[in-house]
Amino acid sequence: MKLYKKGNDQSYTLGVFPTIELLKHRPQNVVRVVVHSSIHQNRGYPMIQELCQQYHIPIDVHDRTIEKLSPKNNCYAIGVFKIYTSPLQQAHHVVLEHPMDMGNMGTIMRTMLGFGYKNLAIIKPAVDIFDPKVIRASMGAIFHLNVAYYESFEEYYHAFSDHEFYPFMLKGAKNIHQVHSHQCHSLVFGNESHGLDDTYLNYGQSVFIPHHEEIDSLNLSMALGIALFHFSKAEFEGKEVLREDV
């Protein structure tokens, strides 16, 4: 088995938890699971065995493959799967223009899932979402999401012109605290280094997140987390939600 390269027709997870997420949510795409001989000490292994048996997926024990593909020593499982497409649904969307950072992309996917956003539009050129580094950074959240690439923002805009659009820009006309949405919307974010250009002022209601002047801008994944929290507040109000002990 070779290291992943963009354009391959297969990719793989790195780690027990992302592999379990793959098996739970995309079993139809899984080719096989490769495990390390010491995986028996990992408490997630029984779940991998159960899911592989349920979906008739072979498990191979092959230490050299694990050691070759994993950059870390604590990887006990790799899930090999076929690259797939997942069209966007008519629901709330996150739109990213030219995202290039793999770690940011994985964090964004996990944050989206945490706030109930399961549709991600990506404007090319952009990072490859099926790179194992992205999958690992997402902790398997990618397998819950519908993700689609578009050649241009205009292509995406025409496909979902019935959405409310909220481009996040420093030149945004409204403070996020003054903006509320009650229908399907698209939250639009620019590249990590240069954000959105002024043409996005022509799409929907531009928004800015206020912060102290000591910094010039927020990190993309941080800004997106704040936006998702704000726009999903109505959904979580009055509900019992999972809380982490501090």
Image (spheres, rainbow, N blue to C red):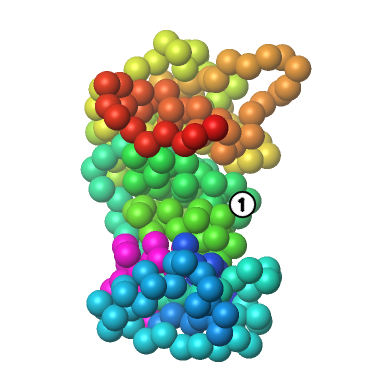
Q: Position of residue 50 (x, y in %)?
A: 31, 75
Position of 20 relative to 207 (above/below):
below
Q: Position of residue 151 (x, y in %)?
A: 45, 53
In this figure, which residue is indicated by the disc labeled 1?
103
Q: Can you see residue 124? A: no
Would residue 25 be counted in the magenta stretch? yes
Q: Residues within 10 Å of mark 1 (few under 14, many from 20)?
A: some
Q: Residue at x 35, y 46 (%)?
A: 119
Task: Name which quarter of the figure residue 45 lies in.
Answer: bottom left
Q: Quadrant of the C terminus?
A: top right
Q: Quadrant of the N terminus?
A: bottom right
Q: Which is nearer the eye, 219 or 205?
A: 219
Position of 151 relative to 94 (above/below):
below
Segment colored magenta: 18-31
Q: Which is nearer the eye, 137 or 184?
A: 137
Q: Residue furthest top?
A: 178
Q: Which is nearer the eye, 204 or 2?
A: 2
Position of 213 relative to 232 (above/below):
above
Q: Residue at x 48, y 20 (%)?
A: 207
Q: Residue furthest right?
A: 214
Q: Residue at x 44, y 80 (%)?
A: 33
Q: Can you see residue 218? A: yes
Q: Position of residue 223 (x, y in %)?
A: 55, 30
Position of 217 relative to 115 (above/below):
above
What is the three-letter code of the residue carrying label 1? Gly
| Magenta stretch secondary structure, dominant | helix
Q: Which is nearer the eye, 92 or 69?
A: 69
Would residue 155 be counted in the magenta stretch? no
Q: Is residue 126 left or right of residue 84?
A: right
Q: Position of residue 92 (x, y in %)?
A: 31, 37
Q: Is residue 210 left or right of residue 50?
A: right
